[in-house]
Amino acid sequence: MFVNGRAIGSGSNWKQLDSYDITKYLQPGENVIAARVPNAEVGAAALVAILTIKEQGHTFVSPSTDGT
């Protein structure tokens, strides 16, 4: 996983979800969150992600990946 071009973590087990707190990597304004997802084996590959955004006042939104 990358935040604003900086590598912050990587998973090693496709059966386990990883969690990252990216707060300290964010900057004022727009930020870019990206994932590099190689497929080392023949067959289908996928990425599942949920991003939880906690706003001031303790409200939050959780957009997730979809079929696009």
Image: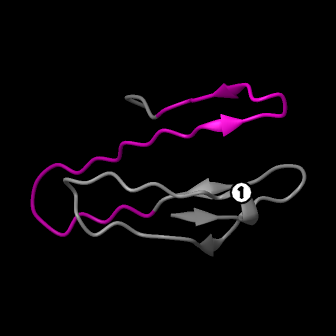
Secondary structure mostly seen in the magenta stretch = loop
Identify the residue shown where x is 35% and y is 47%.
Answer: 47
Q: Which residue is mark 1?
A: 23
Residue type for callout 1: Thr
Q: Residue at the far left: name it.
A: 42
Quarter holding the C terminus?
top left
Question: At 73% from the left edge and 65% from the top edge, which residue is drawn?
Answer: 25
Q: Nearer the viewer, residue 45 or 57?
A: 57
Q: Residues within 10 Å of mark 1 (few under 14, many from 20)?
A: few
Please tell me whether mark 1 sits on a helix, a strand or a loop: helix
Look at the image and name its color scheme.
Answer: one colour
Q: Is residue 57 magenta?
A: yes
Whole-percent x, y for residue 43 in the image: 11, 53
Which image quadrant for residue 55?
top right
The answer to whether residue 65 is left or right of residue 24 is left
Name the foreground residue: 54 vs 39: 54
Q: Please provide the residue range marked out in magenta.
A: 36-64
User: Which residue is farthest front?
Assistant: 58
Give x and y (percent) for residue 17.
33, 51
Count the marks: how many?
1
- State which quadrant residue 4 falls in: bottom right
User: Is residue 66 shown above or below 12?
Assistant: above
Give the residue displayed 16% in from the left and 49% down from the top.
44
Residue 37: x, y in percent? 36, 61
The x and y percentages for residue 7 are 57, 74
6 and 25: which one is in front? 25
The extreme right residue here reads 28
Left or right relative to 49: residue 2: right
